[in-house]
Structures are given as C-alpha cells and as structure tokens.
Amino acid sequence: MHQNHFVLIRVAVMMARICRMQAITSGEFMRRFVLVFLRYFLIALCLGAPVGAQTSPGETGGQGLKPILNYISSAWDTLTRSMTECQSLVDPKISVRPILYLPKELPEPSTVQTLTDKCNVRVEALPVEIHHLGEITTGNIDPPGLLYLPNKYVVPGGRFNEMYGWDSYFIIRGLLQAGRVELARGMVDNFFFEIEHYGAMLNANRTYYLTRSQPPFLSSMVVDVYQAVRKQGGAEDRAWLERAYNDLSKDHEMWTSDPHLAGQTELSRYYDFGDGPPQEAVQDETGFYRKVSEYFFLHPKQADEYVIETQPKVEQNVAGAAYTLEVCEASTTMQHPQCDKARPFKLSKDYYKGDRSMRESGFDVSFRFGAFGSATHHFAPVCLNSLLYKTEKDLEQISVWLGRSDDAKTWSKRAEDRKKLITKYLWNEQQRLFYDFDFVNGRMSSYAYATTFYPLWAGLATKEQAEAVRRNLKLLEHPGGVAMSTEQTGAQWDLPYGWGCIEMLVIDGLRRYGDNNDADRVSYEFLATVAANFRRDGTIREKYNVVSKSSEAHVELGYEMNVVGFGWTNAAFLDLLHNLPKSMADRLEQEQNQPLSAMK
C-alpha cells in the first residue's frame, strides 16, 4: 500500500475517534477531516515522504549509488526547519493549533513577528523563566507548542518535526560529511540556547519535553564542529569555546546531581522530572498503556506492583487513565457468557516515571530496563555513563584549547574515576560484555544489548575488554547489520531491528580498537540493506529489520510506523560509506546496478 494511503487511513481513524468522543455532526466531521488530512499531506510533502518523492521505486538500476546519494543531499534541505517557516510549527503528534513559545525573559525577535499572519500561529512567552528541568509543570502549558530556537535545524522526519537531542549528533555528523558546517554549527548553538533558556539540552523543542533531556552527545557535537571549522581554515573562536565550556559544564552537572544519580554507585541514571503519562504518548500512541496493562496481567512476575486496583475515595499511588479487568467464561455456544464484576485499576506512578525516563534514554520502547522500560530509573546504564565519560574527556580537551590546565586535570580525574566505576558495576567478566546495573536491587542486568559497544566508542574500554566485546559481536550481528538485542519482544528497540545511529557507534568502537575487518563487514551489511530497500520504495527509513534485511516494521509496542526521512539513517549512510574501503564501496555500487529480483 502506498504511504499516502496509510496517512489517509490514520487520519480517518483518528477523526472517527474524535467524532465518537465529541458527538460532532457529519458535516463538522468532514470539515475537520479535510483540515487534518491537508495538514498530514503537508507534513508528508515537507518531510520527504513518497508524496512527490525524488525517486520512484525500482527506477535506480544502472545508476549505482547516485540516486540514494541525491536523495540524502536533497533531504538536508527538505528536513531543515526555522522559526520563520510555517512547516516548522506543525506537530504531527498532537492535533492543536500551532503556537510558538518564547523564553519568558526574551523579547520577541523580529524574525518571528510575521508568524502570526503568515502561519496563523500564536506567539507567546512561557509563564516563568526556566533555569533547570522540572521547574515548570508542562501540563499547565495549554495548548502545548514549539519552543523557539534562534537558528535553522534539521529534524529527523515524519512525526518528529522538531530538533531532537541525540538525533542531532548523528545528523550533524552527516552534515559535516556533506560540507554543511554552518548548518551544523547553528544546531549546536541552538543547544546552547536550550541550556541557557530552557534549563538543559532537551529531548526536543516542544513544551511537553521540558521535563527531560536525552543522551548527552552535546560535547561530541561541539568537538566535531569545532574541528570541522578549523579544518576549513576558520579562525579560532575563543568566545564560542568559552560558551561551549560553560554550557557543557552546566549540562554535565545536571546528569551528576540528584535525582540523576544512580543510588550509591556514583554513576548516573535517566530520570524524567514529570509525572504520569506524557502528553505526546497519550495522543500519538493510542492504546499503548492499555497494552502495557494487559501484558502485566499476563506476566505478573514482571509487573512489580505496577498494576493497582483502584478503590473509591482512597488515596493511591496511581496515575493516568483508568482501565477495567473483567473475567468471563469462554463461550462455545450462543449463550451469553457469565462474567465476574469488572474491577477498575490504574498503572502506578512509578511505572509512568520509568516510562518517561525510558523516553529520556532514547530507547523507547525496549525491554532492556524491565518490561516496557518500566524500571529505567532503577538502572545505571552503560550508554549514559559512557557518554558522561566522553563528555568529561571532551571538557578536558576544551580546557586545553582554552589554556585552562587546572580544569583539564580536574576533568581528566573525573573521567578516570568514572571509568573505574563503570568497570566495577557494568563490566561482566564472565559474560565478557558490558551490562546495565540495577542499583535498586543491587544486581547486574543479564540483558545483552548493543550499548555494550558504547565503552569502545567512548574509548574507556581496556584493550582486553574491547577484544572480549568484539568476540561477542556474533550475538548481535545479522545479515543486515547489528540488532539492538537478542530478545524479540515486539518492541522497536529490540531484535530484529537495527538503527543507523547505533550501527555508527558500534562500527566507530570497532575501528577505535583497530578492528577494521569487522567494522567493514558490518558497514557493508547495513549499507546494502538501506540501499536495497531504497531501490524498492524510494525512501530511507528510521530503522530496519536486520534479520530479514527489510524495512518492514511490525512493531507491536510503541508507535507503529517506520518513519520516512530519515535524519540519522541519512547520516549513517554517508558516514559508513565514507569509511568503507574503495573495493567494498565499488562492490556496493555495482550491486545497485543489478535488477531488484537478483538482489538477495
């Protein structure tokens, strides 16, 4: 089925639900349907979906990699947003009239003064100045809207029409490969703006994300952009480095202070400052929490008191929507089945805290931190603490560039202390892999996950640890690349899915420790998967089934679509291709000239 048909069906279903809830007339239904469909059509057109796509499926034979490279090149502009363009304000996740919020203390910039008439959008100031996450109750910002950023930025694509925290690191690497240095630098400056005016590097620039951050890749963005500017012959910008140092230090402090501390381990954890179900999930992931409830009833050992029967007029530690459990006899005749009285229940506040924190981790949804990520805030994760080690090493380097030798020594010591803690809590000598640590129950996880390669990417693994992890690559490697886990849970961040961002980190880690053979092979597997599927449907996707080497995503848990665009997959393709040996790149090129029927 064509992608546009999926959009049409989704809009029809969504509007039918609204019809039922609000009892609107058929005429009003049609009016709303047309408006919403036009909105989704505009999104598809703007974000690189197959509406007017540059390449038709199956038409790239004989041109090698040129069609996909052209698609990626044009996508940087297709996915670029700014505060002066109407398409930047649309939120595919929440159906509200677009509104742009400015920091309380910021005078309205001249660049946004035309938005009211041009885009039929309100421009308002946030109710208070924000100095740190959790300082404002996002549910009180009604309607939710876009947060102002001063510079252009690249969005991932599809339902993700805003600038995301960790996506942007990979996107920036792609931009630098494409020579788009100024656009990349502008995105880094936007993150400085977020830290200075919204309290942290945000999950993304929407009001409902003001309670959480995302994996801290910002220092890596700063170092990469700074080096790219110098490589281009740009003058050393000490003021920019000073700003970077101050903002990175503030963001690092957030991750290394309560409530982001992982118990007594001195490591850090993911933690969302909000409570209850997040706004975007309630509206955009219809039925998700109902599926969670059903799963916990069928798997009580994993429920961990997340399901609580509600009692009238009793204060309980619950949140979110109410559900009912009704047990009936299985009827085998026309006779009406006998049922027990329906029992009302809700999910606990602790479950929603874990769910929100899982979203801060970026790995939503996986069973890595318990079922549905429900215990995310109970773990010291390999990924986060490797990133904080990398941040500390980057701050050491920035201190050297700024001539601050004492600061450089301080950051070096902090990095070494974290390295020792990671080995103590997160390295499994028997399994020869890095695992997350459940600090609440005082035990190491046994959930094998692709983040075991983060310590290699960050350079904190010893040579012996890196070699041991390399030998275990076979646990996660498949014909289309590296899968996220060894567990097929129905969640998109588990088996059988592979994501361009993680392929990049795994391959970087292998190369960092001299394993180019494995890195080249995995690169080729993933590149060939992306290229072959581009041949079939003319698009680049958010994720791929690396077992079947397809872009088909039968996701049962989380949002169901395999988003088109797509920022970090575009970047991964450029980056992996750039580092592939010429002989393998030539082979990939030739493979794209074969008929689709001949490609495996």
Image (cartoon, rainbow, N blue to C red):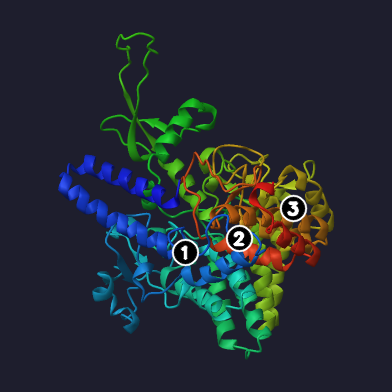
Judge left or right: residue 38 versus residue 171.
left
Q: Which mark is residue 552?
A: none
Secondary structure beneath disc 1? loop
- CA gap between label 2 and label 3 equals 48 Å
- Residue nearest the observer in this picture, 514 or 375: 514
Seen at 59% across and 82% down, the residue is 241
Total numbered labels: 3
- The residue carrying mark 3 is 423
How far across and down, in percent of the image, does residue 18 sit? Answer: 25, 45
- Residue nearest the observer in this picture, 213 or 168: 168
Q: Which mark is residue 60?
A: 2
Seen at 46% across and 76% down, the residue is 152
Q: Which mark is residue 202?
A: 1
Pair 2/3: label in front: 2
How far across and down, in percent of the image, does residue 469 sit? Answer: 78, 50
- Residue nearest the observer in this picture, 422 or 531: 531
Query: In which quarter of the view is residue 9 placed?
Result: top left
Few, some or many C-alpha atoms within 10 Å of disc 2 (few <14, some 14-19, many ≥20)?
Answer: many
Marked residue nearer the N-terminal end (1 or 3): 1
> Which amino acid, mark 1?
Leu
> Which amino acid, mark 3?
Thr
Q: Is residue 500 above or below residue 444?
A: below
